[in-house]
Image (cartoon, rainbow, N blue to C red):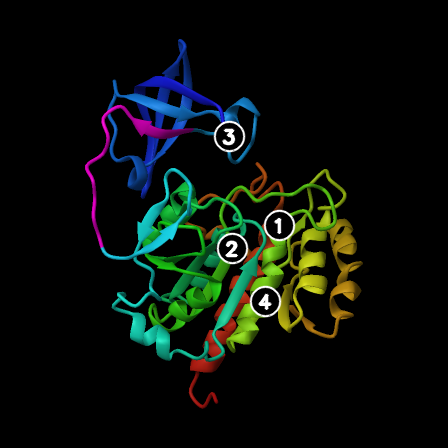
Amino acid sequence: MTWRRGTISKPGRAWLGGAEWWVTIDGVEHLALAYTDLVGFLEVGDEVAVNTTATDRGLGTGGYALIVSASSLPEPRTGPGHIVKARYMPQQAMVMAVDEPDSPHYDILAAAEGLDGMPVVVADLHSALPAIVACATHDAPGIRIAYIHTDTAALPLAFSRTAAALRERGDITTITSGQSFGGDFESVNLHTALLAARHVIGADIAVVVQGPGNVGTGTAWGFSGTAVGEAINAINLLGGTAIATLRVSQADARPRHLGISHHSLTAYTRVALTPALVPITSENIDPDILAVIESRYPTLSGTGRLTLVEVDGIRAGLSSSAVPLRTMGRGLVDDYAAFAFAGAGGVLAAGLVAETSSPGAD
C-alpha cells in the first residue's frame, strides 16, 4: 500500500455512508473518499492518513484516494452483533448479521427453508442494478425489491452512489452478504441473504449484483463475474426462480465483450449447473449488433438448463430510471443494448410476480 498524509481542504459530494473530500498532499489536491461508518465525520482542516494506491496506478472505478484515519479518532461505538466483516483487515468492522443468534430475525432465518419461487435476478456488472430496478418498478409500482450486494468487488455498500440513491428513494432494501458491509441488513453468506430477502424483508423479487469495481484479467476464468453462476446454483438450491441477465454491449471496443460478453457465457454455461431463465430482447436493438448477439444464443440454449425468454416493453422503464444509467463510461444512448438486456431482467421478474399474485394463480 502507498500511504500519504494530507489536510482536508474542501468537501465534495456526500451520500449515505460515504463522503468525498479534497485532500491536499504535498501541495496537490486529491479527491478522496471516506466511509463515515469507519472513520467518522470529518471537517476542513483535519489531518488525515490517505491510501493512494489506486490513484497512483490510475485505476478507473476504484481510482479514489481513500481516507484511512484522521488525527482525531472518531468516538468509540459499541453495538449489537459479533460478526466481523473485512476480517483481519486493519479496519475490520463488527456488525449484527441477520442470521446470528442475537439477531431479532434469527428464529425466522432458522426456520426458513426456501424462497417459495421468488424471482431472483442476477447480473455481472453493478451498472445493471438501476436498469433492473427501473424496469421492475415501472412495470409493477410498489414492488418490493431486495438488493443483495455481494463481496466480489467493492466491499463497502457505501462505495455505490447508485445504491445509496435507490435506497434513499425506497426503491430497494439492501443486504450486504459475505465480507461486504453497510446494508440495511447484514448476512454471513449469499444463501442467508436470499432467505432474509424473502422472509425478513418480504421482498417480491431480489437482485444479486456485485458492487462497483469488478475484476477482469482477459483470461477465460479470471474475472469476478463467475460468481453469478454460483448465485444461480444457490437460488435453485433454495427454491427460487433464477433470472440470468446477459452482459451485453453494442459499443465495447474489446471483442470479448462486444455482443454477449464471455463473462456471461462462461458463468451461465460452465459455472451454473442448474436452470435459469435468460431474458433476451430485440426491441430497439441495432440489427447489426443484434446479429452478433443472436449468434451466441445456441451456446446458451444448448446447455439444456437455460431457457431464453423474449422480453419487450423495456425502453419506457429505462427512461424512468431515477438515477443515471452508466456503464464503463457509456450512457443509455451510447450503449443501449447493455441496459436493455439488464432491464429485461426487471421486466421479466415483475411479470412473474404479477402472474403469481393474479386471481386464480396457483
The residue range painted magenta reads 66-79
Q: CA distance from mark 4 to mark 2?
A: 12 Å
Q: CA distance from mark 2 to mark 3?
A: 21 Å
Q: Relative to 106, is 1 above or below? A: above
Q: Amino acid at mark 4?
A: Ile
- Circle 2 sits on which residue? 209
Q: Amino acid at mark 1?
A: Ala
Q: Looking at this rendering, what residue extends furthest in the front direction?
A: 88
Secondary structure under the numbered disc 3 in the rendered image: loop
Secondary structure under the numbered disc 2 in the rendered image: strand
Q: Which mark is residue 338?
A: 1
Indicate which disc, 4 or 1, sits on the residue closer to the N terminus. 4
Query: At 39% from the left edge and 25% from the top edge, which residue is drawn?
Result: 50
The percent position of residue 332, horizontal first and vertical second, equals 56, 44
Q: Which mark is residue 232?
A: 4
Q: CA distance from mark 3 to mark 4?
A: 31 Å
Q: Looking at this rendering, what residue extends furthest in the top direction?
A: 27
Indicate which disc, 2 or 1, sits on the residue closer to the N terminus. 2
Q: Which mark is residue 63?
A: 3
Indicate which disc, 2 or 3, sits on the residue closer to the N terminus. 3
Q: Is residue 265 magenta?
A: no
Secondary structure under the numbered disc 1 in the rendered image: helix
**Of helix, strand and loop, which mostly describes the magenta segment?**
loop
Is residue 359 rendered to the left or right of residue 60?
left
Secondary structure under the numbered disc 4 in the rendered image: helix
Q: Nearer the viewer, mark 4 or mark 1?
A: 4
Q: CA distance from mark 4 to mark 1?
A: 21 Å
Crowding around mark 3 (Cα neighbors within 10 Å: few <14, some 14 to 19, many 20+) is some
Q: Given contact means CB atoms under 8 Å apart, are the residues at marks 4 and 2 in contact? A: no
Viewer-side residue, 127 vs 216: 216
Viewer-side residue, 98 vs 311: 98
